[in-house]
């Protein structure tokens, strides 16, 4: 897959991927320590979501919302994949503790975050800080971004996404 992303350097200004852009390909490890390459999901629809930190209340709540509504996504052919900066032990613990049955990916060097523009300056309680910019990408069977949602709220996001995709509520 190719990308219009300008840089994968996490220190650079974040890119913003737009609808119609080919989703940048990458290879990282999942919660089992196994390699995962996005392009291996070619032919399937993908919901790729970026969250801040495994085990925190908002991120755990968002993951559990995906878990609890996973059937609605899979029945429509979507594969859900979560990405964080956490190391494998942290995402493995969250997956085990919360009985998550979808893939979580470890991106501690923020390479994937750089490709997708999901790390940079954001407002947190009125202050500018560097951190994960919570985002979700809906990718079609050809690997093209159909929808890109940046700066989302964890609470209610899964319900909003289901509504926008026309899935059963």
Image (tube, rainbow, N blue to C red):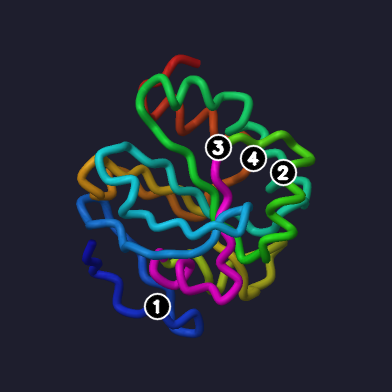
Q: Residue furthest top?
A: 168
Q: Earlier in the sequence, mark 3 or mark 2?
A: 2
Q: Are the residues flagged by discs 4 and 3 in contact, CB closer than 8 Å?
A: yes
Check disc 2: other Cα within 10 Å, few if <14, some if 14-19, many if 20+: many
Q: Secondary structure at mark 1?
A: loop
Q: Are the residues flagged by discs 4 and 2 in contact, CB closer than 8 Å?
A: yes
Q: Secondary structure at mark 4?
A: helix
Give the numbered dot on residue 157: 3
Classify residue 143 as left or right of residue 71. left
Which residue occupies 23% across, 49% down? Answer: 144
* Residue 41 in the image, given as x and y percentages of width and height: 34, 45
Give the total number of marks visible in the rendering: 4
Which residue occupies 55% across, 37% down? Answer: 157
Task: Give the CA distance from mark 4 to mark 1.
Answer: 26 Å
65 or 130: nearer the viewer: 65
Q: Earlier in the sequence, mark 4 or mark 3?
A: 4
Q: Secondary structure at mark 2?
A: helix
Residue at the disc numbered 2:
60
Residue at the disc numbered 1:
8
96 or 167: nearer the viewer: 96
């Amino acid at each position: 897959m190719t990308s219009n992303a300008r840089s994968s350097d996490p220190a650079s200004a974040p890119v913003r991927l737009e609808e119609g852009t080919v989703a940048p390909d990458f290879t990282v490890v999942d919660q089992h320590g196994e390699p995962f390459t996005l392009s291996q999901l070619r032919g399937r629809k993908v919901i790729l979501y970026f969250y801040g930190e495994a085990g925190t209340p908002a991120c755990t709540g968002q993951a559990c919302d995906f878990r609890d509504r996973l059937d609605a996504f899979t029945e429509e052919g979507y594969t859900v994949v979560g990405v964080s900066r956490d190391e494998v032990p942290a995402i493995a613990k969250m997956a085990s503790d919360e009985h998550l049955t979808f893939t979580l990916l470890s991106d501690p060097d923020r390479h994937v975050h750089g490709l997708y523009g999901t790390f940079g300056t954001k407002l947190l309680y009125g202050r500018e800080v560097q951190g994960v910019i919570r985002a979700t990408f809906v990718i079609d069977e050809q690997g093209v971004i159909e929808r890109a949602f940046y700066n989302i709220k964890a609470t209610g996001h899964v319900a909003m996404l289901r509504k926008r995709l026309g899935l059963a509520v």
